[in-house]
Image (tube, grey):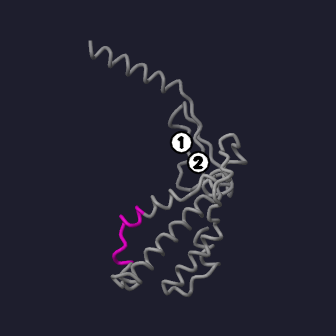
Amino acid sequence: MVDEAASADTEAAKKYRAERKALLLLDNAPSHPINLNDLLNNIKVEYLPKNTTALLQLMDQGVMASFKAYFLCRTFRQLIAAIDGEEQLSLRDFWKQFNITNAKNNIADSWDEVKNTTMNDVWKNIWPECIQDFQGFPQVQTLNEAQQEIIALANGAGLEDVDQDGVVELLE
């Protein structure tokens, strides 16, 4: 009895998957195989035109730069705290003790700092119905303000060569 039910579920699942159709959009990275359309009948693969990925992929339109700026600010704050704090670590010693767990925690905390307004700015031109109105909330740090904080923190940590152009290039 159990085998019959499992068999029926399997047949239903196969039928459901066979009837479902999907469109998979990929960028034009040379690492993507060109014959993906030959693998399954119900999945159509299309490749984005050359030099359009950054224009079409939403995360490339400010979200990643904001995230990276928050990550750098957080990391530089930790660096300065280690250099100026009780431990009085050197720059080299700080980086020696900075590990994957530190980076993972900074990534999670930095992603939490990416504001809904940043996401709204990305989506408003493509799918305006999905954005939320956040008027009346306090003004958030702009990307330019985050860049200035990164420069100040880096300079405060003894990295005098860090300037606006270098930070902009790094975030891009």
To which residue does mark 1 refer?
36
Tags 1 and 2 touching, CB below 8 Å: yes
Q: Main secondary structure of the magenta part?
A: helix
- Quadrant for the N terminus, please: top left
> Does the magenta segment cover residue 55?
no
Q: Mark 2 points at which residue?
A: 26
Q: Name the image quarter holding the C terminus.
A: bottom right
Front residue of 100 and 134: 134
Mark 1 and mark 2: span between their CA atoms?
11 Å
Q: What count of labels does the image hold?
A: 2
Image quarter of residue 168: bottom right
Comes first in the chain, label 1 or label 2: 2
Quarter of the image for residue 89 reads: bottom left
**In this rendering, which labeled residue sits more in front, label 1 or label 2?**
2
Image location (x, y in percent) of residue 6: 32, 19
Q: What residue type is labelled 1?
A: Leu
In reply to whether residue 104 is colored magenta, the answer given is: yes
Span highlighted in magenta in the image: 95-105
Height in image: 93 above or below 39?
A: below
Q: Which residue shows up at 62% across the image and 47% down it? A: 47
Q: Residue at x 57, y 80 (%)?
A: 152
